[in-house]
Amino acid sequence: ITPIAPIIRLDTNDPRFVSKPFARAEGLVSCAVLPLVRSGRALGCLVIFTRTRYEFSDDEFELLRSFAAQAAVAVHNAELYQSSEHRRFTAERLASVGRLVSQSLEPREVGQRIVHSLLELFQAQMAVVYTLDPRNGQLTAFEEASLGMGCRAILPPGEGAVGRAVALRQPVVTADVLDDAGIQLGLETRAMIDASGYRAVLAVPLIAKDVVRGALVVADRVGRMFGEDDL
């Protein structure tokens, strides 16, 4: 589907078919592949397999085109609904945290609500609020929520994605913090991240009155791609 291709008819011995072990295990011989396209955007593909050698006719492909068009509409509508629900859910959580911030004078309570809301919003493995010590540049974990292993309590200046975000005064995103040459990691921090598996990181500095006060961090399993919507 990249680039969007026309209908493809092939058998599972064709060099273009890359899942040969799967095909052999399932006894699949011939297949037809049609892209699911909506407004010029590929959303997926419709694949039909047979367990005997089969030549799909032009009439059959016309029918499959109709199925693919209907499937593309269904997938597109599902995406719109999911996006709408996510925006509603996000707005509700942000409003809840905003109410708490305006009502509570207890920093710990506010911090706990923030990290638990981040964990739920991002469906991530860990969320942390760090505070910055302006005297030595160290970052200290103020509040944390995690589905497994926790974070390092104190980070030296500039270390990790969060340290870089604070130093740059802008968000830092990485799909694998252990394999990112732009992020400095000490041996202890690297070992802890490696053990936890939380290698995809989104870090955002907390800035008030043009002064960096700390940072928010959301972390997930390696390969998670945080995008513009997350920021």
Image (cartoon, rainbow, N blue to C red):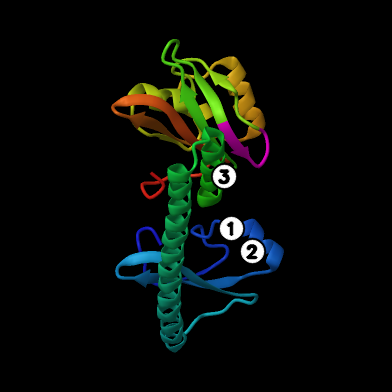
Q: Is residue 146 magenta?
A: yes
Instruction: Count residues near mark 2 (Cα–Cα under 10 Å), then give few for <14, some for 14-19, many for 20+.
Output: some
The reply, left or right, for residue 186 in relation to residue 40 is: right
Instruction: Name the secondary structure under disc 3.
Output: helix
42 or 84, nearer to the observer: 84
Q: Quadrant of residue 186?
A: top right
177 or 218, nearer to the observer: 218
The amino acid sitting under disc 3 is His
Cα–Cα span, label 1 and label 2? 6 Å
Residue marked by disc 2: 23
Mark 1 vs 3, N-terminal side: 1
Q: Is residue 155 above or below residue 39?
A: above
Q: Does the image show residue 35? A: no
Residue marked by disc 3: 116
71 or 62, nearer to the observer: 71
Q: Position of residue 139 (x, y in %)?
A: 49, 21
Tell me which segment is drawn in magenta: 143-149
Q: What label does residue 185 carry, if any?
A: none
